[in-house]
Amino acid sequence: MPANIVAWLKEREELKYIKFITEYPAIKKEVPLRNTTVAVGIDGMTIVDSFVENDEGVLVENENCRQVNIKLRFSIHAPFSSGGAACHDAFTDVIDCLTFASSLNIESSGCDKIVSDRDTDAFVLTAWASVIASLCPASSSSLDLPSFLGKELFCASHINDEAIHLSQEQAEYLNSPMYAGQYMGRGSSSFSVDLGFRPRLVIVTADGRPMMKLDFDAKQSFAYFGLAFEEGNTCGVDLTDTGFTVTNSTTSDVLGCYPLLNELGKPYRYLAFR
């Protein structure tokens, strides 16, 4: 980062009177000093969670980015012949360029007292600027970084431990373990209900009708009720990967019982357990 800032500052026409160098790797200053020289370095940085406003104006945590506060350090050396004011002039010009002409988000800046350095025959001013930036996985990166939460740096081993943290599927199960719904009979031999998940148990019944209707004369029965689970099912209900299927038949029976779970125009209700 200091090298990039130095390269950018060198291109500014209004700063041509200043020689820019980096503190690391260190670049030697000329002795005795002839021109004002500014050495750019990093004094430190702090990484914290990032928050953004949602549509309702409420701050929510941005799981894919972090906010970083970088403290840049400027060591400004001005020749004795230029006077100590040259240090302040250089600092003012540099900060103005970085604040108003660069893409850096300068939050604050400041400086210490001017001191005399006999090694370079110069006045020296140590200054700083606080920069706010975002750390997000680059879209062009070859690394698999869908979220910073997946990195050990942010305690992934703790977050991904399902012994103490629930997976999304487990959380959905606890939040809504049962789904109640209804459908209108189509009159076809079969009808599929899409739940968006494979249920563990489904119970289906015709609304306002008995579970079974018996015809003693014909020795037949008709089922307005059915259920299905992984280990088995009654006639008329079968589980699918995305829900369940019901059957309606007056020609195909099981032990003389005909499933009537999709009669035309009749309402049915069901309970599906995740």
Image: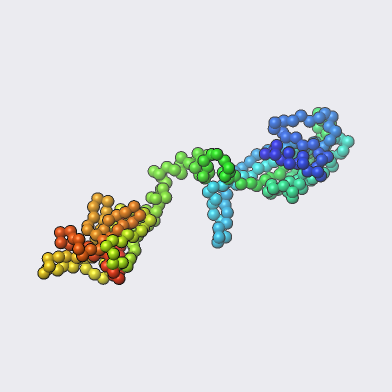
Describe the colour scheme in one phrase.
rainbow
The reply, left or right, for residue 70 in relation to residue 19 is left
Residue at (49, 42) in percent of width and height: 150
Residue at (42, 50) in percent of width and height: 168
Residue 267 found in image quarter: bottom left
Q: Can residue 118 be seen in this view?
A: no
Q: Nearer the viewer, residue 69 or 229?
A: 229
The reply, left or right, for residue 124 in relation to residue 249 is right
**Residue 175: where, in percent of width, then height?**
39, 56
Tag count: 0
Query: In the rendered image of this protein, does residue 228 appear above or below residue 117?
Result: below
Q: Nearer the viewer, residue 194 or 108?
A: 194
**Residue 186: where, in percent of width, then height?**
31, 67
**Residue 91: where, in percent of width, then height?**
78, 43
**Residue 266: where, in percent of width, then height?**
29, 70
Residue at (15, 59) in percent of width and height: 255
The reply, left or right, for residue 157 in relation to residue 244 is right
Query: In the rendered image of this protein, does residue 182 appear above or below residue 143?
Result: below
Query: In the rendered image of this protein, does residue 252 appear above or below residue 39?
Result: below
